[in-house]
Image: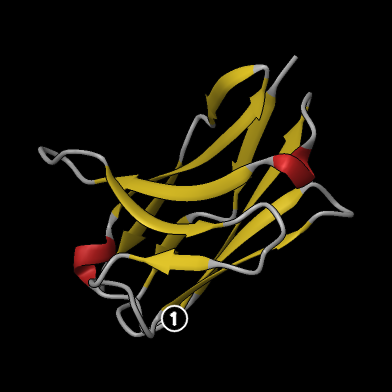
Amino acid sequence: QVQLVESGGGLVQPGGSLRLSCAASGFTFSSAAMSWYRQAPGKERELVALISSGGGSTRYADSVKGRFTISRDNAKNTVYLQMNSLKPDDTAVYYCNARWTWGRNYESWGQGTQVTVSS
């Protein structure tokens, strides 16, 4: 059974930092591209950051470049999102996403973790 379990969200003041984690199970993690998405109230879900299966390639939304860092530990089946210099506009539910191919394309989502940036 495929599972993605996010953790690390919470309330933080503007300028603060948080690190999100996503623990994966039920598939070959090292073969999956992993992403973080977010969805703010009244807005569409948007891609925040993506990392290739081997970790050698990353991509970021323009709004988070230079502030957020995506990384992965294939030995621990975990992907991380380090978020620094947080702004109120970063407030959203953050979702972990996995995509991999095994005969056909597969995709899975976590349940989301709330990040609130407020003073």
In the image, what residue occupies the spot 58% across and 56% down?
Answer: 8
Q: Write the residue at 47% across / 37% down.
A: 112
Q: Nearer the viewer, residue 117 or 42?
A: 42
Measured from the top left, where is residue 87 in percent x and y? 26, 75
In the rendered image, residue 108, in percent from the top left (x then y), is placed at 55, 26
Q: Which quarter of the image is occupied by the N terminus? A: top right
Q: Give residue 44's position: percent from left, percent from top.
A: 17, 38
In-image side of 47 versus 5 (left or right): left
Give percent across and percent down for residue 77.
Answer: 80, 47
The picture quadrant where one finds residue 90 is bottom left
Helix, strand or loop under label 1: loop
- What residue is rendered at 59% in x and 43% in y? 6
Q: Quadrant of residue 48?
A: bottom left
The image quadrant where one finds the C terminus is bottom left
Q: Quadrant of residue 20?
A: bottom right
Figure check: 59 above or below 50: below
Name which residue lies at 42% across and 81% down.
Answer: 16
- Report the residue marked by disc 1: 84
